[in-house]
Image (spheres, helix red, strand yellow):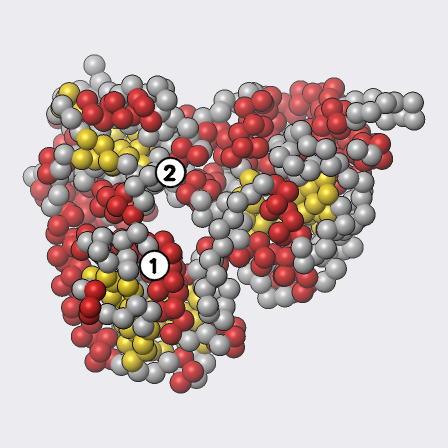
Amino acid sequence: MSKLIAFAAIQGGYKVVSKAEGEYQKALETFNADSKIEFPNTGYYLPVIYSLTGLKVETLEDIKKPLEFARGLLPDHVKGKNNLPYLGPLLDAGMAGLFAYEIIEALRILRQPDFYLPQEDPDIEAGKIWVGPADDIILRKRGVEFVDGTAPGFAAIVGSAPNPEIAKMIVEDYQKKNLYIFCAANHNGTTVIQQLIEAGVQIGWNTRIVPFGPDISSAIFALGFANRAAMAFGGVQPGDYKKILLYNKERVFAFVNALGDVGTEWGVAAAGCVNWGFPTLADTDIPEVLPTGICTYEHVVANVPHDEICQRSVEVRGLKVTISEIDIPCSFGPAYEGERVRGADLQCQMGGGKTQATELVKMAEMNEIEDGKVEVIGKDLTDLKPGGTLPLGIYVQVAGREMQTDFEPILERQIHHLINYIQGIMHIGQRDIAWIRVGKAGVEKGFTLKDIGVVLHAKFHQDFGKILDKVQVTLYTNKEDVDKLTKRARAEYRTRDERVDNMTDEDVETYYSCTLCQSFAPNHVCSVSPERTGLCGAYNWMDCKASYEINPTGPNQPIEKGECVDSKLGQWKGVNDFVYKASRGAVTHYNFYSMVIDPMTTCGCCECIAAMLPACNGVMTVNRDYTGETPCGMKFTTLAGVMGGGASSPGFVGHSKFNITQGKFILGDGGLLRMVWMPKILKEEIKERIIKRGEALGVSDLYDKIADETVGITEEEILPFLKEKGHPALSMEPIVG
């Protein structure tokens, strides 16, 4: 290892810490010492400092301690007489620099609260291209993708490429490998983000190209995201720096690409990242750190050609990436799922209220279909002028010795994702309310409707090959054909819905586990029954059954219920035995139907969290999209931080939106009739299901009796409303005691 890089990084550490100290003193001259310091809508204070030291920075005055901590980490300067190795002091200097960068960014937000646009997509037209630190809604939404493997890791890119074309090439290489790209810092007066905008590339969380900020200090948001994942999903406690760093090395596969001249401030950032096991690969001739030890392989690699930097980065990080090569003219992968086709870019559209668009998957006999046959009956995209419309019916027939009719809706739901994975194509909705928009760029590359069939054929075989032998796709664009398919499809939908909705936990002797989230929450075991969908909302009992059939060694394993321990609370001996083993002894038992007594464990991916409201003798729930205060005194982000990571927390429980109106929802505590508050956005989303469930429970106006934030955000504020409406919870037996 070169003395030069150690010298530069340590110098950078001193420089950055001094800069942070100077900005802190300026802030004290302008703001009161009790001025609030935070990354907006996050529950982890300054997350790098908090996670590694346990220090909570809540006010301007609180910055003093971590600043002193950073100063104390700075090692002696490297001098000519010093002997090897330099790695230890280098790592300390790097960590000091990162603490300073996080403080610098916190002070920027204090001074310029509108500098960052804290949402998923930037507002380029308004000049708001930097999104800053991800709020907790984004963290938990995107965390699922790191859990289920659709996002195998992230590339943190600092600086800029020689030109926009090279920037686009590098980023698209990462998108094809399904990685997130976190961008910060500038070089030669521009940034990768600005180059991508110039090249016409969509940026934002939805396309996995995240514009954190214009300075090297903004790169701290990438590390903050990683550390928050460890606390939110992995249950790692703040201050346990060893576990935090090991968690990231082993579970969050990330690395840095330095594009441009690496000075002392970049150097200290790179040194800091090594603590996480995140290596740096540069396109310039910088001193290398090749010995292994902290990172999986090399620590710093220089002179990497731009057309090789993606593959070389993946190799150095030790990341295993599965790439789907689909024979279509556009790029394909999950990274394109969040793309939007806006009016100026629109070539044509199908559905969305403009025309009818319907999707149906049906099982066929082996001799009835021809594998790989894709047919378009009617006009194709090339027959339309820009802005044109077409009706569309997507009819997929599948056959296989292991195929079952129960699997049809599982396969059908994949159509949404798979079409969205095509670069330049946008898909919204499903079933008979689908909406597809095709961009001009896709058509210019040669994309046709037939390519949708090519994608579905290839991916169905790839993802469901254990149950499928043949896939045939027919795409209808004549109105009479689409109407005919739609009529048939609606009859199929009704049959399916009635079957699933009418299933009860008593109908089956086997439940299913879901351990996808154990990659982030090692002690969490989600058990899925017909009347208790997975916490994330993505998996119901039928999904898990299909998943097991497809992959018998996968995350969805059968659980024989065994002897019933408590029918009211929902506890079975077989489930307990499975949970104990799957949690490695951390969890001995839990109840399906109670949030008061030994509730199911909760990961960080849940759609909603329910909490007791003792003064109202009821419960509330809050969805992760709601950012406001709640009557339990905690926002969703705080709740998730308190009881996420695989813990069983009496008085609280994570659950899906759909689960709210299922028959067994907290039945052991009184069921849905205990629900006294939920955010208006959630209440309206599931309005019809609440009304239907209320009628089944004998309270036809239950929907109107449930308070929301327009009524109040404290128990004291909502209680008069509940009394006025005669909410049934008020007359039920006490929820506690």
The extreme top residue here reads 737
- Name the residue type under label 1: Phe
Residue that extends furthest to the right in the rendered view of this protein: 80
422 and 716: which is toward the camera? 422
Give SS at disc 2: helix
* Point 23% across, 43% down: residue: 545
Which residue bears the numbered disc 2?
516
Please identify the residue farthest to the left as the structure is shown: 698
* Residue 207 sits above or below residue 512 on the image: below
Side (left or right) of 106 relative to 642: right
State the image coordinates of residue 611 (x, y, percent, origin top left): 30, 28
User: What is the CA distance from the residue labelled 1 to the residue labelled 2?
Assistant: 21 Å
Task: Locate residue 9 relative to residue 120 in the image: left or right.
Answer: right
Q: On the image, which quarter does residue 22 sit in?
A: top right
Image height of 626 relative to 426, above or below: above
- Residue at coordinates 27% horizontally, 81% vertically from top-left? 478
Front residue of this view, candidates 405 and 171: 405
Crowding around mark 1 (Cα neighbors within 10 Å: few <14, some 14 to 19, many 20+) is: many
Q: Quadrant of the C terminus?
A: top left
Residue 531 shows in this picture: yes
